[in-house]
Amino acid sequence: MSIVTISRGSYSKGKEIAEKLAQRLGYECISRDILLEASEHFNIPEVKLIRAIHDSPSVLERFTFGKETYIAFIHETFLEYIQKDNIVYHGLAGQFLAKGIPNILKVRITANIEDRVREEMRREDISEKEARYILKKDDEERRKWSQYIHGIDTKDSDLYDIVIHIDNITVDNAVNILCDVVKYPCFQTTPESHMILKDMLLAAKAYSALAQSYPKATVRSEGGVVFVSIEANLSLEAKVIKQVGDILKDIDGVKEIRTHVIPFGA
């Protein structure tokens, strides 16, 4: 039992690999599911969220609660999904969303630009020049999105356990490789990794609840004890502690709340 995240560029065959891998393993394959839930949560048509991703990432600042709440909800939804285990995820920034979870296999799929151009020309019935321009623009937008939202460059190989270049290695070869790698003991779910995941989900739920009032708060959880750090004026410490308690008290799984107020500039 394990979890796989696949990062991919457009026309890199990453989607095909994710779907075939999930089918071979008998896992659930998810991608747009999280975006669909985000659109419902924010009461924003899905097409607007898609445009936000493929246009300037700063468009998130126009949303009522800004990017912190959007990211918090995506993170929470991702963690909720993978509680079930046996997941292949090939959506937004899986390598970031999975950060800190020890047993997740993080994969990057790349492909030759010339092969990608030909595929774009074939699918869209456009010229080589148009296809090349669209792909370069799409790659740059994906890079800017990840750097703006998550502070990472998706091309950084240090983010992944394995990088597979689709060329001599085919889609089926890639699926075969990943089917073998995912069976390694280090990628199997253990009671310890499950507890880490459970704590991360609880922390994510707590931060999602706090994000509107305290977007810069840091939150972690250990065995149901939620630790919150917030920068504020010390004269407001009692008020902040009470407000945090009121916000988090009804979240299922919270056993205790410990709020630490950090003086501004400390």
Image: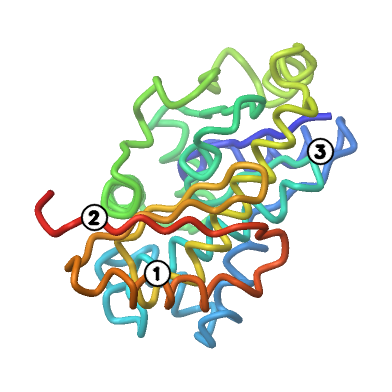
Residue wearing tag 1: 241
Reading the chain from its start, which is encountered first: label 3 or label 1? 3
Residue ranking furthest to the right: 26
Q: Is residue 231 left or right of residue 64?
A: left
Q: Where is 125 relative to 83, above or below? A: below
For the residues labelled 1 and 2, say whether their Cβ atoms are less than 8 Å apart: no
The N terminus lies in which quarter of the figure? top right
Q: Position of residue 259 (x, y in %)?
A: 42, 58
Q: Residue at x 48, y 58 (%)?
A: 125
Q: Quadrant of residue 211?
A: bottom left
Q: Residue at x 13, y 49 (%)?
A: 266
- Of the numbered discs 1 and 2, the one sitting upstream in the chain is 1
Q: Mark 3 falls on what kind of element?
A: loop
Q: Which mark is residue 262?
A: 2
Question: Which of the pair 151/222 is nearer the observer?
Answer: 222
**Number of callouts in the render?**
3
- Please tell me which residue lies in front, 168 or 222: 222
Left or right side of 85 for 263: left
Q: Is residue 134 visible?
A: no
Mark 3 sits on what residue?
86
Amino acid type, callout 3:
Asn
Q: Is residue 57 visible?
A: yes
Q: CA distance from mark 3 to mark 2?
A: 40 Å
Estimate the x, y position of residue 52 in percent, counting from the top left. 37, 70
* Tag 2: amino acid: Ile
Which three-letter amino acid code belongs to the residue tagged 1? Ile
Percent x, y of residue 98:
55, 39
Query: In the rendered view, does 30 fall on the left or right side of 215?
Result: right
